[in-house]
Amino acid sequence: MGLTKTEIFTKEQNKIATMAKVIAHPARVAILQHLLKVNECICGDLVEVIGLSQPTISQHLREMKQIDLISGNIDGTKVCYCINKKTYNQMRDMFSKVFGKDPKGKDCC
Amino acid sequence: MGLTKTEIFTKEQNKIATMAKVIAHPARVAILQHLLKVNECICGDLVEVIGLSQPTISQHLREMKQIDLISGNIDGTKVCYCINKKTYNQMRDMFSKVFGKDPKGKDCC
DNA sequence: ACTATTAATCGTAATATTGCAATATAACAA
DNA sequence: TTGTTATATTGCAATATTACGATTAATAGT
């Protein structure tokens, strides 16, 4: 198969999974970290900093754009990318909801 | 290809990606949420609660075990699963490190 | 010993992901 | 308009993921 059965899960579960998937690749983690550091940059910068080909970086950027984690503004021949604060904060809330609990009990059974 | 070039990324970037990948599927999110709620349960419970086949659930559990998010203790014919607090907390720290920043600046460029 | 219960593993089909070369597109500069 | 720069898209090969039926293994109860 290779196809996730999204219909049997809640909206929240699917959303969390989708958000997690976007940072489930080191290149996309690196892109996010770089954007946090420099605030904004163009695709070419990331190609240099990260060391993957331009088409590959472009593809990763598209995936991050698809869930609105970043947005790109055309500036001449360049495209200026930056973090979309709203989604970024939404992701923080989601992850802290999942990982903010205190799992009680001894470590197992 | 289909093969991630892990060697060009930092240990931290790869670690974050690996942790994120584990919750990048709604079934594994559901397993984590259920374990947070009931503290401990067996594989069969999850098959019922989630609605995927036993082999599929077993496979998801294995992935979560591989990064030590959960551990399973044999108890007769059953296996009792629960959250591994240490890794769970480690994941919280990791995600809050990535999403705990305050991205300044207007929304883009 | 026999049977039921529970979970892991194997094998396999369908689909998704990763990465890049080649190409296309778009804007600027001379 | 021609060349240059920057990014996106397409097509493809290699690998990974998801899901499940069939089987196996291990224990418990009778």
Image (tube, coloured by chain):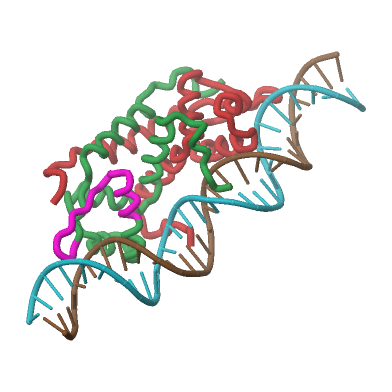
Chain colours: A red, B green, C brown, D cyan
Which image quarter holds the C terminus of chain B? top right
Front one among B43 and A21:
B43
Question: Which residues are the magenta region?
Answer: B60-78
Q: Residue at x 42, y 38 (%)?
A: B17
Question: Residue sitting at 57 percent across and 22 percent down?
Answer: A41
B78 left or right of A81 in image: left
Q: Position of residue D4 (x, y in %)?
A: 79, 22
Q: Does residue B41 sit above or below A80 in this rendering? A: below
B32 sits to left or right of B41: right
Q: Which one is nearer the viewer's eye here, B102 or B58?
A: B58
Q: Residue A84, can we see it?
A: no
In percent of width and height, residue A18 lies at 43, 45
Query: Residue B7: percent from the left, percent from the top?
Result: 50, 34
Q: Please check the rendered image and state whether residue B64 is part of the magenta-colored stretch, yes or no.
A: yes
Q: Is residue B47 left or right of residue A103?
A: right
Q: Is residue B67 above or below residue D18?
A: above
Question: Is B76 included in the stretch rendered in magenta?
Answer: yes
Identify the image quadrant of residue D28.
Answer: bottom left
Q: Nearer the viewer, residue C9 or B93?
A: C9
Residue drawn at x 58%, y 29% is A51
User: Which residue sits at x=21%, y=40%?
Assistant: B85
